[in-house]
Amino acid sequence: MDQRRREFVKAAAAASAGVALAQSLPAATKAAPMKILILGGTAFLGPQIVEAAQARGHVLTLFNRGKTNPGLFPDIEKLHGDRNGDLKSLEGRKWDAVVDTSGYVPRLVSLSATLLAPNVKQYVFISSISVFAQDIKPGTAEDGALATMPDETSEELPKNYGPLKALSEKAATKAMSGRAWNVRPGLIVGPGDKTDRYTYWPVRVAKGGEVLAPGDGDDPVQYVDVRDLAAFIILGIEGNLTGAYNATGPAKTLTMKAFLEGVQKGTGGNAKLTWVSADFLEKKEVAPWMDMPVWVPRRDGGVGMTQLNCAKAIAAGLNFRPVSSTAKDTLAWFKTLPEDRRGKLAAGITADKEKELLAAWHAEKKG
Ligand SMILES: NC(=O)c1ccc[n+]([C@@H]2O[C@H](COP(=O)([O-])OP(=O)(O)OC[C@H]3O[C@@H](n4cnc5c(N)ncnc54)[C@H](OP(=O)(O)O)[C@@H]3O)[C@@H](O)[C@H]2O)c1
């Protein structure tokens, strides 16, 4: 076993035993500094990978078009280009690993992986749990059935997001002759997430009062804090992981009730949860996931997607901070946003809609 692998196994064992990653790796056991290229790096997950890598002493290069947050990380080397046809600035350079956070179609993943294959040891492709077929069963591991599409040459997004990520995994693996690590996150949440597909809850719960909570409280939910995912990605680079890894959490089943209670613990406030049935919400055309973020009712066949088996990633060191910490930090980040942005959440329901639904729910219960 080489030194890199030995250090990784030690760190992963400590991390999966519940020790926070940063604490589990004393400076003396830090991996030797590595050169890491990120294809992207400046939106949401990318910056957290940068921070996690820097905390471990690694040296970074970012490749992007220079459009998204161009002023970020002034001290890091930036290479400009476009995945869609201009990869010149990557030619003739060597890195230990490349992390592809911006690959969505196999044609472009293949272009970059083919170009980089002779010059990088590992290609980390950030995939998604959306690679799985919709009807997978609870407990599905990495070998579950994958989503497909009739015309594999179509690059239609977001319609074919899942199948295209599945084909992109294949493309990376092929171009790298097996040296690709396909990381499949579930919903990525935390500070910096612009989609509000999780942030709705800390914001709403902190506001207090009667909160419409979807379902009966027993529906399982899964997500991963962007910082925990980033730490895992760096750990997997140090350990030179390959193959597919489901990367969502937490480690044990988290119900919607336990989730919202954890959020309340992190955000404080006097919120009182009123659980409103999935049938009622369906009748009122309140959509799981986008109107009621994070939530997928058990009866919608969404169970598999919210109960994926992540044991392989957990054994390799994927660690999860408490529900309350993610909620607390996300709320603190949200409060730093401009007022007009804070007034318009990109997911969830408005205060007026919530009031109307709660009134109708109480009236139905009385009647
Ligand atoms: N959010 C979730 O819940 C979730 C769940 C599962 C999986 N994922 C996956 O996680 C990843 C998240 O990525 P992120 O957006 O947060 O990553 P990021 O690395 O923070 O940001 C995306 C980067 O890609 C660059 N980029 C975009 N188009 C480009 C092009 N044509 N050529 C070169 N660079 C380009 C952008 O910079 P420029 O604009 O300056 O080029 C930006 O730096 C995605 O792969 C997504 O599919 C997300």
Image (cartoon, rainbow, N blue to C red):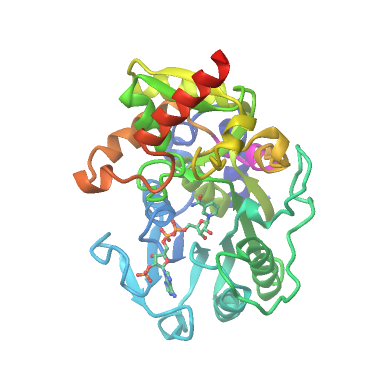
316 inside magenta stretch: yes
Residue 205 screen position, x and y as percent: 38, 26
Point 40% across, 50% down: residue: 48
In the image, 30 versus 237, the foreground residue is 237
> As drawn, is 353 to the left or to the right of 360?
left
In the image, 25 versus 131, the foreground residue is 131
Res 13 → quadrant: top right
In the image, 139 versus 301, the foreground residue is 301
Res 162 → quadrant: bottom right
Instruction: Inspect this view and state whether residue 241 appears.
Output: no
Number of numbered discs visible in the structure rendering: 0
Above or below, 302 relative to 159: above
228 inside magenta stretch: no
Residue 339 screen position, x and y as percent: 20, 44
> As drawn, is 30 to the left or to the right of 161?
left
Q: Tell me the quadrant of ligand 1.
A: bottom left
Instruction: Inspect this view and state whether residue 280 appears.
Output: yes
Res 272 → quadrant: top left
Point 32% across, 18% down: residue: 269
Q: Which residues are magenta?
A: 312-319
Above or below, 334 relative to 64: above
Which quadrant does the C terminus fall into? top right
Point 46% across, 42% down: residue: 189
Q: Among all residues in the image, which is located at the extreme front?
A: 367
> As drawn, is 207 to the left or to the right of 153?
left
In the image, 41 versus 162, the foreground residue is 162
Above or below, 340 relative to 362: below
Residue 64 screen position, x and y as percent: 38, 72
Residue 323 screen position, x and y as percent: 48, 27
